[in-house]
Image: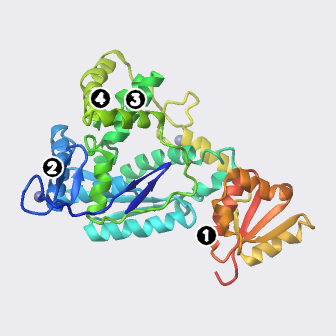
Amino acid sequence: MRYYKYGEFFEFEFKEYPFLCKLCKKEKALIDIPSQGIKVCKNCYNTFFENRVRKTIEKYKMIKSQDKVGVFLSGGKDSSALLTVLKKLYPEINLQAIFINLGIKYHSEKIENLVRTLCNNLDVPLYVYNLPEKEGYRIDDFVFTYFKNKICSACGAIKRYLFSKIAKELKLTVVATGHHLDDVVSTMLTLFFHGDFSGIAKLQPVLPPLSPNQIKKVKPFYTTPEKEIFYYVALNEIPIANFLCPHADNNPPKKTKKILIELEKENRQIKYQLLSVFTKKLIPLIKSYHQNEPLSTCSKCGEITSATDKICSRCKRVELLNRVEDKNIELTQEMFENYVKNLDSNWILIDLKEKENLLKDSVRKLRKFFKPYRDKYIFLNATDPEIAYSLALKLRKMGFKAYSVKNSEN
Ligand SMILES: [Zn+2]
Ligand SMILES: [Zn+2]
């Protein structure tokens, strides 16, 4: 099994080792526990993994028996594994899964289906918040704004707002997030290099609400390495999305991640040592000196913001979308015919039938191919509407006036 992440991927292969599990000494060893350097059977792997999560939850008093615990699912390995483990460790707890359908065409629907399967399998109630239906816009619409090449950042601001809003609507008392050891340590290092100490203080295992308007956030994977989450998902065949968001920045892993990988080769415990220094020494020190930044509420949506003009970053971004008059990228045959009526000869229709590998081309090659059509309206047609749509998105980000046209049969 392979799992792609932005700029990197994980690989997993079952292999029966010719010796017995290091822990139970009964079953054949099947899998490595990277942080321990031992090879164990499936049962022992699961027990080891789940016990560490249980210990973290208990040590930091993350969840009480009367809590209503929310898990926002992204379809990725971390949140899917988190929901699975919580249900297994605490079958009696009031657990609520949430999925935000961001209206990323073709992509969001596929993830929603996966998430539904996961929740059905686990028998956990799922709440789906459909952004286009509820608020009238899609994340894709940001290709019409100056955020077209930073869609992840616009999307992040909108998701943070929705996490808080939905948590209140569903009367959650705790939100559990899938942040794991690698996330926490590499973010801590990055913030440290930037001198952002108040950011570091926010990376605690439990983040109490800053105001009555907020909800407690906990990180049950605080001490779990990312690779071990991936192994847990593969071993237990947890359904996850193994495809990338069309808006994902395909950046190589951050510098700090690379530094950590190098350090880990010499010292397997380095991440735990860094985590311990940060949480036991640095965070208490920062908290004793640091005053919380003054917070106010957004004058438009009522959520907490540190913006001096009292309009939160989510509302500023939504305002940009409100100014876009025509948000169509994907046209039906009929819409297409109406469009071109008013365009004289200033347009071109490109059938992608034999050009589907254009999609895999680099931005530089695409720019070269489409250069003759710089000032024209470009209409794209393909047997698979998803292919035409994702190329249209890509071209929009490069500044072309591109549309995809659905065939009448699809
Ligand atoms: Zn075993
Ligand atoms: Zn707002």
Q: Quadrant of residue 114?
A: bottom left
Q: Quadrant of ligand 1?
A: bottom left
* Mark 2: amino acid: Asn
What residue occupies the far front of the structure in this picture?
A: 18
Secondary structure category for the residue under label 1: helix
Q: Distance from label 2 to label 4 (Cα)?
A: 22 Å
Instruction: Please name which of the two marks, 1 or 4, marks the residue nearer to the observer.
Output: 4
Badge 1 density bin: few <14, some 14–19, many ≥20, Cα 10 Å:
some
CB under 8 Å between callouts 1 and 4?
no
CB under 8 Å between callouts 1 and 3?
no
Between 286 and 189, the one lying in front of the other is 189
Judge whether 55 appears above or below 330 on screen. above
The mark nearer the N terminus, 3 or 2, is: 2
Badge 2 density bin: few <14, some 14–19, many ≥20, Cα 10 Å:
some
Residue at mark 3: 189
Check residue 386 in the rendering and tell me which mark sits there, or answer none. 1
Residue for point 39% across, 23% down: 292
Secondary structure category for the residue under label 2: helix
Residue for point 54% across, 38% down: 312
